[in-house]
Image (cartoon, grey):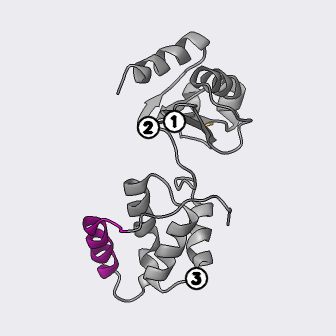
Amino acid sequence: MSAEPTPIPADLPADFLADVDRTVSHYPVSMRSASLPLLHLWQERFGYISDPAVKWIANRLGLQPINVLELVTFYPMFRRHAVGKFHIRVCRTLSCALGGGYELFEILREQIGAQGDGHGVAVSPDGRFSIEFVECLAACGTAPVMMVNDDFYEQVNSPTKASEVLAHYKGKE
Ligand code: FES
């Protein structure tokens, strides 16, 4: 696991702990089956799954941290690092790569002022935006495609269109 200092809150919120207990209670036969639901719960609340979070969840379920970490690293929907308020995902699988996904990524990355080479998550200096590549978003016929949080955008095939998408979020609190 990385050495990044990513502590968990000293006192986890009572409502969160209640959610955890409720979720675990749904799996009386094997607490291990609660791993994915707990990871979702954690990410929804704290934004990403840090190393201490992996350990906390493993401990809660009576597992080894590696049992939880392997899920976090296998499923692309789980984030290991903090992201911005507006998290941009750009598809880089074949149709989108051919349709300009890599160029789109660079345009967006530059416009939010983030550093990075496309590996992992790049965050803007003010922390409001972040960007990362993802694999196929299942809209290959309208490449290149991107998402901002849960909003989906297709055929973002020009710098102007990319700027228009970003402008929508730059104006938001
Ligand atoms: S290749 Fe980009 S959505 Fe499928």
Of mark 3 and mark 1, the one earlier in the sequence is 3
Please indicate whether residue 71 sits to the left or right of residue 117 in the image: left
Residue 64 — which label?
A: 3
- Identify which residue, 136 or 84, lies in the foreground: 84
Contact? badges 1 and 2 (CB < 8 Å): yes
Residue type at mark 2 is: Lys
Residue 53 — which label?
A: none
Residue 91 place in picture, x, y as percent = 61, 36
Helix, strand or loop for disc 3: loop
Residue type at mark 1 is: Gly
For marks 1 and 2, give the CA distance: 7 Å
Q: Is residue 75 above or below residue 53?
A: above
Helix, strand or loop for disc 2: loop
Q: Quadrant of the N terminus?
A: bottom right
Which residue occupies the extreme top position in the image?
Answer: 160
Which residue occupies the extreme bottom position in the image?
Answer: 29
* Residue at the spot of label 1: 127
Q: Is residue 11 above or below residue 171?
A: below
Residue 126 place in picture, x, y as percent = 52, 31
Of mark 2 and mark 3, the one earlier in the sequence is 3
- Identify which residue, 132 or 126, lies in the foreground: 126
Residue 85 — which label?
A: 2
Which residue lies at the image location 45% right of the left edge and 51% below the top edge? 47
Sort mark 2 into few (<14), some (14-19) or many (20+) by Cα contacts within 10 Å.
some
Secondary structure mainly formed by the magenta segment: helix
- Identify which residue, 64 or 154, lies in the foreground: 64
Q: Is residue 52 above or below residue 169?
A: below
Q: Quadrant of ligand 1?
A: top right
